[in-house]
Image (cartoon, coloured by chain):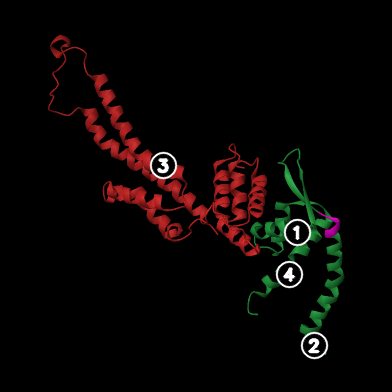
Chain colours: A red, B green
């Protein structure tokens, strides 16, 4: 039913709606999802986001549908998602703050706790959780690899006696690698802050209304 | 008795409001939802679709798909012959019913 060419915001909303409607009769659930999908079809992301604001929280729509359905058919699939502690606003603030600044306050450990809270909440998609977990370490690793490659490339091909270059003291760290030890954590922190801001905005939007 | 009076009243008449809207013209889900929500008759599409499903099961409305040049293919709802009869029956009863209620609860004009 999901249109894979639709903007991400539409696909996320339809997926959340479908999950929230678990327990509602198949006929009603399919009608609601299809009705929303046809209305959001063909819209750009910004226009779709405005329509979604009008529609409101999937959990609220599902609660209304359940209240109006006199004899709901309980299906084994699609359990009702938990909208408990891990979806509350203080939880969003704590999680994204730890992602953004936890690694600075308590190096590494603060960020790891943020990642654990992130994975424990249904507010974020699996893809978002993977990005938040993988990208900061990958950004740091990229900086280190880049420094190593540049360092190797900058070494003279021939010994100093042949080239006349000044001898390099092997006990002193190379400048590029030395710089990387500072810029790699910095890259990870910057990536974490950007990801934290994006995840925070998305979670607020999903819990709106 | 102390429950939301407005909700109780809406619950009793919203199906007929939908039949009334569809008696004017076939409508798709979103447009029905907007019309009813703007008048406070439903809270969201979550209220609308179970009712539409019920009306369809009862044979009071039917559906058909229709595309447009600028928009997507939409599922339209239209009133069936049985739906028209049901609506007419409600119209006949509504006015005397409302007058009766008014007779009980209306403030004494004297």
Crowd tier of the residue under label 1, counting other residues whose Cα lies within 10 Å: few below 14, some 14–19, many 20 or above = many
Q: Which residue reaches farthest bottom? A: B110
Residue at image coords 43%, 57%: A86
Are tags 1 and 3 found on a single chain? no
Query: Which is in the foreground here, disc 1 or disc 2?
Result: 1
Q: Which residue is mark 4?
A: B12
> Are the residues at dot 4 and dot 3 in contact (C-beta closer than 8 Å)?
no
* Viewer can see residue A57: no
Q: Which secondary structure lies at badge 4?
A: helix
Q: Earlier in the sequence, mark 2 or mark 4?
A: 4
Q: Earlier in the sequence, mark 1 or mark 4?
A: 4
Image quadrant of residue A64? bottom right
Looking at the rendered image, the disc whose residue lies closer to the viewer, 1 or 4, is 1
Q: Please, is residue A105 above or below residue B13 in the view?
A: above
Which structural element holds mark 2? loop
Q: Alpha-carbon distance for marks 4 and 3?
A: 49 Å
Q: Main secondary structure of the magenta part?
A: helix
> How far, Cα to Cα, is label 2 from label 4?
27 Å
Residue that mark 1 sits on? B55
Q: Are marks 1 and 3 in contact (CB under 8 Å)?
A: no
Magenta stretch? B79-83
**Quadrant showing the N terminus of chain A:** top right
Label 1: element kind: helix
* Residue ID for mark 3: A130
């Amino acid at each position: 039913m999901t249109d894979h060419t639709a903007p991400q915001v539409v696909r996320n909303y339809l997926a959340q709606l479908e999950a929230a409607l678990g327990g509602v009769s198949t006929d009603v659930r399919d009608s609601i999802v299809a009705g929303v999908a046809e209305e959001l079809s063909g819209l750009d992301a910004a226009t779709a986001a405005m329509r979604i604001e009008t529609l409101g929280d999937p959990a609220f729509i599902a609660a209304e549908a359940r209240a109006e359905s006199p004899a709901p058919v309980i299906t084994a699939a699609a359990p009702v998602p938990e909208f408990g502690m891990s979806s509350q606003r203080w939880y969003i603030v704590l999680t994204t703050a730890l992602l953004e600044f936890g690694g600075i306050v308590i190096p590494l450990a603060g960020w790891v706790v943020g990642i654990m809270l992130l994975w424990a909440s249904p507010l974020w998609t699996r893809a978002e959780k993977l990005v938040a977990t993988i990208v900061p370490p990958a950004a740091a690793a990229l900086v280190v690899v880049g420094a190593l490659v540049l360092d190797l490339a900058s070494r003279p091909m021939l010994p100093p006696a042949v080239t006349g270059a000044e001898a390099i003291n092997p006990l002193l760290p190379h400048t590029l690698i030395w710089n990387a030890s500072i810029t790699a954590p910095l890259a990870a922190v910057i990536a974490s802050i950007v990801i934290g801001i994006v995840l925070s905005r998305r979670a607020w939007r999903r819990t709106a209304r | 008795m102390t429950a939301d009076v407005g909700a109780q009243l809406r619950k009793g008449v919203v199906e007929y409001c939908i039949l009334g809207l569809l008696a004017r013209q076939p409508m798709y889900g979103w447009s029905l939802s907007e019309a009813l929500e703007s008048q406070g008759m439903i809270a969201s599409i979550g209220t609308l679709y179970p009712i539409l499903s019920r009306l369809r099961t009862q044979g009071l409305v039917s559906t058909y798909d229709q595309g447009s040049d600028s928009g997507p293919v939409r599922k339209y709802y239209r009133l069936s012959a049985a739906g028209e009869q049901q609506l007419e029956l409600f119209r006949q009863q509504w006015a005397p019913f409302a007058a009766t209620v008014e007779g009980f609860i209306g403030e004494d004009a004297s």
